[in-house]
Amino acid sequence: MTFPTERTAVLTGAASARGIGRATADRLARDGWSIAILDIDGAAAEEAAADIAQRHGVQTVGVAADVSDQASVDAAITAVEASAVPPIVALVNLAGISSPTEFMQETKEAWDRVFAVNMTGTFLVTQRALHGMIERKLGRVVSISSISAQRGGGTYSKVAYSASKAGIIGFTRALAREMGEHNITVNAVSPGPVDTDIMGGTLTDERKQDMSKDILMGRVGTVDDIAALICFLVGPDAGYITAATYDINGGLQIS
């Protein structure tokens, strides 16, 4: 199947100017993708979409969405499908929240919220977006896991976050089994420490230096490092890659 020249990538949680999602949206737009940004902050999603459209000359749409709420997700994807952007070919599940709380101080309410956004949100958005991909027999799904899922934390977040991100890996592998017959690939990206707000705010030089001690490349990651990998996985050259988890951590975790 010829990869369409007119196609849309949906990115959740991609409104933040410092986030992996925004960097990925910029790269995809540069490559000619139309962009749909879903974010809990609807105004920020609209602003990010307008900025990308202005700088890259592509069609964009920004929509408010609480990924943990099924009605909100359905309304958001319906709005994207009803807009002027081309059909959805790629979904990048980036929406997530951290949890630096130690296990014995963790509450059920906070635990449930982490899983509602990080795990259930990925399920809800993916299931809704897949309807069109299955119908068109083409799709790319990339979800963000974390090195914390493999190392048991050790960077910033602790048990709740690590467990939810481990769930993303199992979700990816099982879903890939079901989606192969529909010409849809499903992969996960597992970043190491990256200087984004999910690390508790902007990393100071001292924190970066401390985090870099065991990283073979001698530095923490950048949003562009991660975005470059995601863009490849949703692109035309990645049609034979599925059920994979890509470690991108500068050598901090060697699998």
Image (spheres, rainbow, N blue to C red):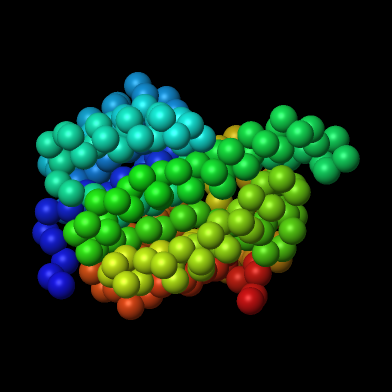
Residue 151's x, y, as percent?
A: 72, 63
Q: Residue at x 48, y 32 (%)?
A: 69
Q: Nearer the viewer, residue 202 or 138?
A: 138
Location of residue 217 by image quarter: bottom right
Location of residue 133 by image quarter: bottom left
Most extreme residue toward the right is 104
Q: Residue at x 19, y 59 (%)?
A: 136
Residue 98's x, y, as percent?
A: 63, 40
**Position of 126 relative to 3 (above/below):** above
In what quadrant of the picture does the C terminus appear? bottom right
Q: Determine if residue 8 is in view.
A: yes
In what quadrant of the picture does the N terminus appear? bottom left
Describe residue 223's horizontal placement relative to residue 23 as left or right: right
Residue 110's x, y, as percent?
A: 71, 32
Q: Residue at x 53, y 60 (%)?
A: 171
Residue 7's x, y, as percent?
A: 17, 53
Q: Nearer the viewer, residue 248 or 188?
A: 188
Q: Nearer the viewer, residue 29 or 160?
A: 160
Describe residue 81's horizontal placement relative to residue 239 as left or right: left
Q: Residue at x 67, y 36 (%)?
A: 112
